[in-house]
Image: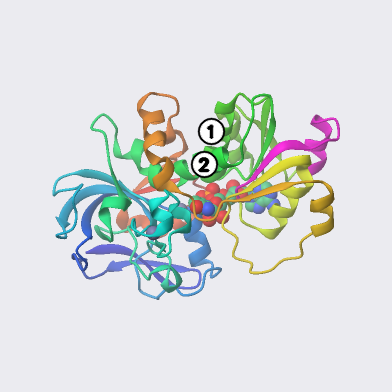
């Protein structure tokens, strides 16, 4: 099959790869109809995430059609249209039974290397999905692939962290990062009737999307976002700050921008193992830090898809480019350079 492959740090390639087949009784093989490039893929190709096998298939956001199932698959059959989750949960452990896929004892991630299961990804013609009953979701016939694909990752991630950060009506919310995850966090934060959502990024082109969604843009290339958020909150800080970048400095920015007694939700993937932490200050200011971990996609994706079907949000507004799979390398370049906000690949 044709696929986008991780070559080496900083390098992706388009090439041939063996077709996947059912290996375990819970597996399904999906013929991919759309695959997307995610900010988390950048951690892989920029070398922040060790253990990705050179030559393996990248990607974890996809829709497609089931074409092969193992003997234990109950909920899906050949021909079903599905969206897949980026976290591959076991569905059977103590945590999965409590609907806490984030903490699954055998959590794996498609296309994310040997420390999370060494599974091939979905930027390809076919993908093998372990434990398909837990890791696929049927797509309602009224929804297009483009409307459904982000339920498997960034849309559900935005909903998950907005819920977990416990935004209350009237709150002032700050979202740090206006990439796809920050934009979905912004869209869902706005559903809690906050007094305002301030979305922070360094790029005017991305902030435009946040503004169109109903947020107030804060351009961190022009103003100090912490000073700006303090200014608009009578020097208190925001009630809730959601960090959607994944750098130590943006986590610190979130701590600085939140009010005493407020909440910082962290959903950016943090690959720094240790950073300095202002323990006394965080304690004194009584800040609640809500770590997202790997989003509990399975816990929220039905609700996210319901929201799309009922017209409460349109996830397709973030798609700026659709390319054939064989132009995926160019798609990565455009996403990395921020020429593209979200790239869809069509195998
Ligand atoms: P992205 O790279 O497109 O977006 C990151 C945004 O942050 C960019 O728009 C960039 O301009 C902005 N940014 C960078 N430095 C900044 C700074 N100093 N101040 C303000 N803005 C800054 O990625 P994305 O797809 O939106 O993903 C965002 C993060 O969420 C990544 O770390 C990704 O790995 C993570 N993620 C986490 C989960 C999860 O389950 N926890 C799921 C999906 C994605
Ligand atoms: Zn992702
Ligand atoms: Zn589990």
In the image, 121 versus 152, the foreground residue is 152
Image height check: is 174 above or below 269? above
> On the picture, is 175 further left or further right than 312?
right
Marks 2 and 1, how far apart in space? 7 Å
Residue 140: tell me if it is visible. Answer: yes
* Residue shown at the point (72%, 57%) measured from the top left: 249
Q: Of the numbered discs in the image, which one, if any, rests on residue 158?
A: 2
Say the numbered circle drawn on residue 83.
none
Going by the image, does 214 lie left or right of 93? right
How many marks do you count on the picture? 2
Query: Residue at the spot x=54%, y=32% of the render?
Result: 187
User: Who's the residue at 34% across and 39% down the image?
Assistant: 148
- Circle 2/circle 1 CB separation < 8 Å: yes
User: Could you say which is closer to the camera, residue 145 or residue 346?
Assistant: 145
Viewed as shown, does residue 293 lie left or right of 230? left
Is residue 225 at all visible to an observer of this figure? no
Q: Nearer the viewer, residue 73 or 128?
A: 73
Q: Nearer the viewer, residue 233 or 104?
A: 104
Q: Earlier in the sequence, mark 2 or mark 1?
A: 2
- 93 relative to 147, above or below: below
Q: Residue at x 32, y 52 (%)?
A: 135
Q: How far from the left and from the top, in percent, is residue 273?
A: 64, 69
Q: What is the magenta range?
A: 224-244
Q: Which mark is residue 188?
A: 1
In the image, residue 298 lies at what x, y percent? 39, 47
Could you tell whether 190 is left or right of 36 in the image?
right
């Amino acid at each position: 099959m044709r696929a986008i492959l991780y070559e080496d740090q900083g390098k992706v390639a388009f090439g041939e790869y063996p077709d996947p087949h059912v290996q375990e009784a819970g597996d399904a093989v999906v013929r991919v109809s759309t695959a997307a490039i995610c900010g988390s893929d950048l951690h892989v190709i920029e070398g922040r995430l060790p253990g990705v096998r050179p030559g393996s298939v990248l990607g974890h956001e996809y829709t497609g059609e089931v074409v092969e199932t193992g003997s234990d698959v109950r909920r899906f059959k050949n021909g079903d249209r599905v969206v897949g989750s980026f976290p591959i949960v076991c569905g059977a452990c103590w945590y999965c039974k409590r609907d806490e896929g984030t903490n699954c004892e055998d959590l794996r991630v498609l296309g994310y290397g040997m420390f999370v299961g060494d599974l091939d990804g979905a930027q390809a013609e076919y993908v093998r999905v372990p434990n398909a009953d837990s890791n696929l979701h049927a797509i309602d016939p009224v929804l297009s692939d483009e409307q459904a694909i982000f339920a498997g990752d960034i849309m559900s991630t935005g909903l998950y962290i907005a819920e977990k950060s416990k935004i209350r009506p009237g709150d002032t919310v700050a979202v740090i990062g206006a990439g796809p995850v920050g934009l979905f966090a912004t869209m869902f934060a706005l559903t809690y009737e906050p007094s305002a959502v301030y979305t922070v990024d360094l790029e005017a082109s991305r902030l435009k999307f946040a503004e169109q969604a109903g947020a107030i843009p804060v351009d961190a290339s022009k103003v100090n976002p912490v000073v700006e958020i303090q200014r608009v909150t009578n020097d208190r800080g925001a009630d809730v700050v959601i960090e959607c970048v994944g750098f130590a400095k943006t986590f610190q920015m979130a701590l600085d921008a939140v009010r005493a007694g407020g909440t910082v939700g962290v959903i950016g993937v943090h690959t720094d193992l240790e950073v300095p932490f202002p323990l006394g200050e965080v304690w004194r200011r009584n800040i609640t830090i809500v770590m997202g971990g790997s989003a509990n996609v399975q816990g929220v994706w039905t609700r996210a898809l319901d929201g799309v079907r009922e017209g409460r949000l349109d996830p397709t507004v973030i798609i700026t480019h659709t390319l054939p799979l064989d132009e995926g390398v160019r798609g990565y370049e455009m996403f990395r350079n921020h020429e593209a906000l979200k790239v869809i690949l069509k195998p």
